[in-house]
Image (cartoon, rainbow, N blue to C red):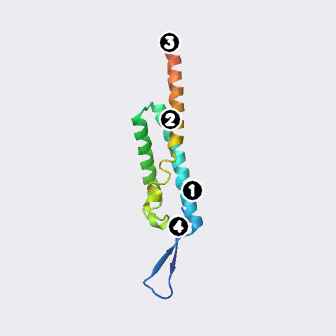
């Protein structure tokens, strides 16, 4: 992740201005969105294969997003304000953005698994 640059005022040594590079902030936000989308897809496939249904599937999604937030904070070495404007950007941004991808990849493997099981049961029983 790209960090911030620090600029000290020449007039007063007490005033430390923190300036952020817009390109670095935008790059860091892209990392958050791509990470959440990728893990939403992987989590959806895992939830479908495990056969999670209803509320347990959504709880699994929120668990995956919580783990993703912790991972992103750890990647920033717990110095969030060095890479982002606020904690909300890491914890909340994109949290619900990957939900549609999760549901898509959750239902498709689950449906395929159920069809496969129906075929196996028809053949052997």
Which residue is rendered at x = 48% and y = 65% of the image?
Answer: 85
Mark 2: few/some/many CA within 10 Å (<14, 14-19, 20+): many
Q: Closest to the observer: 88 or 60?
A: 88
The residue at which mark 4 appears reads as 3
Q: Are marks 2 and 1 in contact (CB under 8 Å)?
A: no
Q: For the residues carrying marks 3 and 2, which lies nearer the camera in this image?
A: 2
Q: Who comes first in sequence, dot 4 or dot 1?
A: 4
Name the spot of residue 104 as percent of width and height, x first: 54, 36
Image-quadrant location for residue 1: bottom right
The residue at which mark 1 appears reads as 30
Which residue is rendered at x = 48% and y = 36% of the image?
Answer: 46
Distance Cα–Cα, label 4 vs label 3: 60 Å
Under tag 3, what secondary structure? helix
Q: Are marks 2 and 4 in contact (CB under 8 Å)?
A: no
- In this rendering, is residue 82 above or below 46? below
Q: For the residues carrying marks 1 and 3, which lies nearer the camera in this image?
A: 1
Q: Which mark is residue 124?
A: 3
Q: For the residues carrying marks 4 and 3, which lies nearer the camera in this image?
A: 4
Q: Are marks 4 and 1 in contact (CB under 8 Å)?
A: no
Q: Are marks 4 and 3 in contact (CB under 8 Å)?
A: no
Under tag 4, what secondary structure? loop
Name the spot of residue 25 as percent of width and height, x first: 55, 64
In the picture, measured across the screen, residue 57 lies left or right of residue 32, that is left
The residue at which mark 2 appears reads as 106
Count of numbered labels shown in the rendering: 4
Q: Who comes first in sequence, dot 2 or dot 1?
A: 1
Under tag 2, what secondary structure? helix
Q: Closest to the observer: 95 or 79?
A: 95
């Amino acid at each position: 992740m790209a960090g911030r640059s620090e600029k000290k005022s020449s007039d007063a040594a007490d005033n430390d201005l923190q300036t952020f590079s817009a390109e670095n902030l935008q790059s860091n936000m892209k990392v958050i969105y791509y990470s959440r989308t990728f893990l939403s897809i992987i989590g959806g496939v895992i939830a479908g294969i495990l056969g999670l249904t209803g509320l347990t599937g959504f709880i699994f999604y929120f668990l995956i997003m919580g783990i993703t937030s912790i991972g992103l904070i750890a990647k920033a070495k717990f110095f969030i304000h060095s890479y982002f404007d606020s904690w909300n950007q890491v914890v909340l941004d994109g949290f619900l953005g990957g939900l549609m991808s999760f549901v898509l990849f959750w239902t498709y493997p689950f449906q395929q698994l159920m069809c496969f099981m129906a075929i196996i049961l028809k053949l052997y029983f």
